[in-house]
Image (cartoon, rainbow, N blue to C red):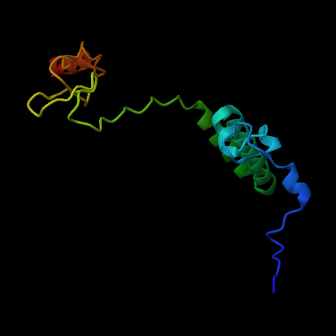
Amino acid sequence: MTSENPTNKKPAEEQASRSPCAAGCGFYGNPATKNLCSVCFKKMYPNEVEKSNDNNKNKSNDNNNKNGNDNNNDSNKIKEVDTEKKEPEKPKKKIQKKKNRCWKCNKKVTLAGQFKCKCGYVYCARCRYPDAHNCEFDWKKQHQDKLAK
């Protein structure tokens, strides 16, 4: 009683046409992604992945525009223009996970030897001064605000 499941069978041609990933990761590659698997393609060609995602979004917007009202078209165009005008965001500030180590020199610091700076990081006795660790806190502005009061 051996029953063959047709979903498990693949044509011999399909199995023969599959080639391993060109990066050598062990997965199968795709000719559309330059014989790379999807993960390796994203790592090696991030710009092309973004372009293809943008093209897919534009195609879906075009399809929606054909089916939608003219008012929806105008609002979609306005939203697209607004997203393009946004300034690039500043990179997020890194979070110090190990509070018992100096942020600059990574020296282990005891509780009594920890110096917390206004920039939010913990430093050792040698790196505690703002000029020693290139502090990003705006000291000049703080002093000007104090004088303004």
Q: Quadrant of residue 131?
A: top left
Drawn side of residue 59 relative to residue 149, left or right:
right
Q: Residue furthest left?
A: 112
Q: Position of residue 35 (x, y in %)?
A: 78, 40
Work out whether residue 43 or residue 144 is closer to the camera in this orientation and state it. 43
Q: Position of residue 145 (x, y in %)?
A: 21, 21
Quadrant in which the C terminus appears: top left
Above or below, 97 against 6 in this view is above
Q: Position of residue 60 (x, y in %)?
A: 75, 50
Residue at x 81% of width, y 87% of height: 1
Q: Residue furthest bottom?
A: 1
Q: Position of residue 98 (x, y in %)?
A: 26, 37
Residue at x 16% of width, y 17% of height: 147
Q: Residue furthest front?
A: 1
Q: Quadrant of residue 31?
A: top right
Work out whether residue 32 or residue 147 is closer to the camera in this orientation and state it. 32
Residue at x 71% of width, y 46% of height: 57
Drawn side of residue 54 relative to residue 106, left or right:
right
Residue at x 23% of width, y 25% of height: 107
